[in-house]
Amino acid sequence: MRLRKKHFAIPEMKENPFVFYDGEKYKGKWMEVFENNNPIYLELGAGKGTFTAQSAMDNPNINYIMVEMESNAFIYGTRKILEYKLTNVRALPIKAENILNYFEDEEISRIYINFCTPWPKLKHQKRRLTYPDFLKKYKVILKDGGDIYLKTDDRDFFEDSLKYFEDQRFMEVLRDFDMKEEEYPLNIVTEYERKWRDQNKPICFGVFEKYVD
């Protein structure tokens, strides 16, 4: 369902000190932004920010950056940073395709991709966040041994993504076509994931690691 246009969203986010509309100038300097040397995790397509917010509360020694272009949803994620006093979270309102403009080589330790748009039509598949063109960019910014966590309710998209990761020489650490809650006690179940679980729709989950030959 399309969210109603929120004209207040962008002006409000521009007033939020944790939202970076000028993020390009911090390329290679995100440790200075966080004022520590903790690992940096990205969530691409962060939406309303529930996953990152909960992750940041659970892991105060990890730095998180939410990436999302849709301001109608992202306004809620950026509000969570202030509401929960998440000093280890920053927000970038950018397109994932431009990620190399914002991060230096091997600056990121982990990337989360949660329930992104599967783009099922063949002519649209280049927009997938796991498409090879995107994976090549992620390999640049990920540290050696860094990993990508993927969750989706779309099995066809997941199976295609497995091929993408293999073709780009990521090491498959884990694949699960039916992720049971009881088997993953640390999994953060967002509103969106709960919706599908309540309908008994299987959730696919995979972990893929960047490695050097």
Image: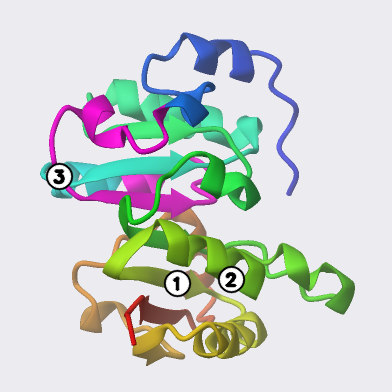
Residue 181 occupies quadrant: bottom left
Q: Is residue 53 visible?
A: no
Q: Residue furthest right?
A: 123
Q: Position of residue 204 (x, y in %)?
A: 47, 82
Q: Which mark is residue 38?
A: 3
Is 190 in front, or is 132?
132
- Label 1 sits on residue: 150
Q: Secondary structure at mark 2?
A: loop
Give, as a three-letter code, the residue at label 2: Thr
Give the quadrant of the C terminus: bottom left
Is label 2 in contact with label 3 (beta carbons under 8 Å)? no
Asked if residue 45 is among those painted magenta in the image, a careful observer would answer: yes
Query: Of label 2 and label 3, which has the lower sequence position?
Result: 3
Residue drawn at 36 percent across, 29 percent down: 80
Residue 34 occupies quadrant: top left
Give, as a three-letter code, the residue at label 1: Leu
Q: How far is disc 1 from disc 2 in space, using C-alphas?
A: 9 Å
Is 166 in front, or is 204?
166
Give, as a three-letter code, the residue at label 3: Asn
Residue 170 occupies quadrant: bottom left
Instruction: Say above or below: 94 vs 111.
Output: above
Q: How far is disc 1 from disc 3 in space, using C-alphas?
A: 22 Å
Is 103 on the left-hand or right-hand side of 1? Answer: left
Is label 1 in contact with label 2 (beta carbons under 8 Å)? yes
Query: Of label 1 and label 2, which has the lower sequence position?
Result: 2
Q: Secondary structure at mark 3?
A: loop
**How many other residues sit within 10 Å of disc 1, few (<14), some (14-19) or many (≥20)?**
many
- Label 2 sits on residue: 130
Residue drawn at 36 percent across, 32 percent down: 90
Instruction: Say above or below: 187 vs 121.
Output: above
> For the magenta stretch, what is the residue range?
26-53
**How many other residues sit within 10 Å of disc 2, few (<14), some (14-19) or many (≥20)?**
many
